[in-house]
Image (cartoon, rainbow, N blue to C red):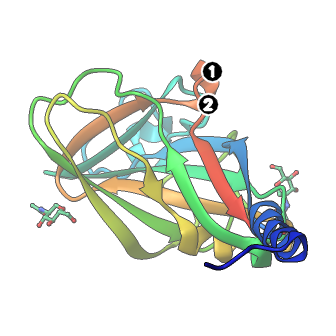
Amino acid sequence: MHIITPLQLCTALTVFTSVIISSFAIDTPATKDSTIFRSTVSCPSCPDRNCYKCTLGHDATLEANTGGLAYIRSLIAFQLPVQAASVTACIVQFPAFTKQIQAPVNVTAAQALSSDWDENTVTGENAPDSGDIFTEIEVPAYANIGAIDVTPACQGADEDGNFSIFLGTRFGRIEIWSKDSGNPAILHITSSA
Ligand SMILES: *[C@@H]1O[C@H](CO)[C@@H](O)[C@H](O)[C@H]1NC(C)=O
Ligand SMILES: *[C@@H]1O[C@H](CO)[C@@H](O)[C@H](O)[C@H]1NC(C)=O
C-alpha cells in the first residue's frame, strides 16, 4: 500500500492551488454598440433618406439582417481589463431578442479591423471594415443567442485592450436589446494572469 507522506500531500496541494490561481474569470460589459445599416432602400428618418448615413449608436436595440436589399450588422466594442496576451478564452453573452424568432437563424461573428469609432457618428459609410467571419452559430426558433466564442477577437485586441466585433446573420433578421437600453452584451474572459 502506498502511504502519502505529509510532504507529498503538501506538494500536491501546492500544485493544485497554483492551477486554480493561475486561471481566473472576469466579466466586462460592452463599452459601445451600434447597428450598422447598409441598404439601398430609402430610409426616411436618415440624412438624405440614405440608409448608409444613419447614426443608430444610441438606439435601444441592435439589429442584424441579411437578405433582400439589406446588409445590416451590429458593431459591438469591448475593452479587456487584462493583457490580451494573458487571455485564454472569451465568450460573449448577448441580451435577449426583442421579439422571439419564429425560424432558426444563423448568427455570425467577425472582428472589426478597428475599434476607433464613435456611437455618435458611426454609419454604414464610415464603419470599420470587417475581418473574415470566425464563428457561426445556429440559433433555434424561439431560443435566444447562446454564448458566442470570440477568443480570436479578444486575442487580437489593440494596445489598449479594445476590440470590436460585427454580429451578422447568414440570412434573416434578428434584433436584440442594446447597451443604451441598459442591457449591454457581457464578455466573459478567462485569463492566465
Ligand atoms: C448554420 O450554422 C450551422 C452551424 O455552424 C451549419 O452547420 C449550417 O450549415 C448553417 N446553415 C446555413 C443555412 O448556413
Ligand atoms: C479604448 O476604449 C476606451 C473605452 O471605450 C477609450 O476610452 C479609449 O480611448 C480606447 N483606446 C483606443 C486606442 O481606441
The picture places residue 48, in percent across and down from the top left corner, at 45, 39
Instruction: Name the mark on residue 42.
Output: none
- Residue at x 86% of width, y 75% of height: 11
Question: Local crowd at mark 2 within 10 Å, few (<14), some, or many (≥20)?
Answer: many
Q: Nearer the viewer, residue 53 or 20?
A: 20
- Residue at x 86% of width, y 66% of height: 160
Q: Quadrant of residue 2?
A: bottom right
Q: Ligand 2 shows up in which quadrant of the image? A: bottom right
Q: Quadrant of the C terminus?
A: bottom right
Does residue 71 sit above or below 176 in this rendering?
A: below
**SS for dot 2:** helix
The picture places residue 142, in percent across and down from the top left corner, at 18, 28
Does residue 157 sit above or below 172 in this rendering?
A: below
Question: Local crowd at mark 1 within 10 Å, few (<14), some, or many (≥20)?
Answer: few
Q: Nearer the viewer, residue 92 or 172?
A: 92
Q: Residue flagged by tag 2: what amino acid is it?
A: Lys
Q: Are marks 2 and 1 in contact (CB under 8 Å)?
A: yes
Using residue 121 as the reference point, say whether residue 67 is left or right of it.
left
Query: Residue beneath label 1, please?
Result: 182
Query: Residue beneath label 2, please?
Result: 179
The picture places residue 24, in percent across and down from the top left corner, at 75, 57
The answer to whether the residue bearing label 2 lies less than 8 angstroms from the nearest atom of ligand 2 is no
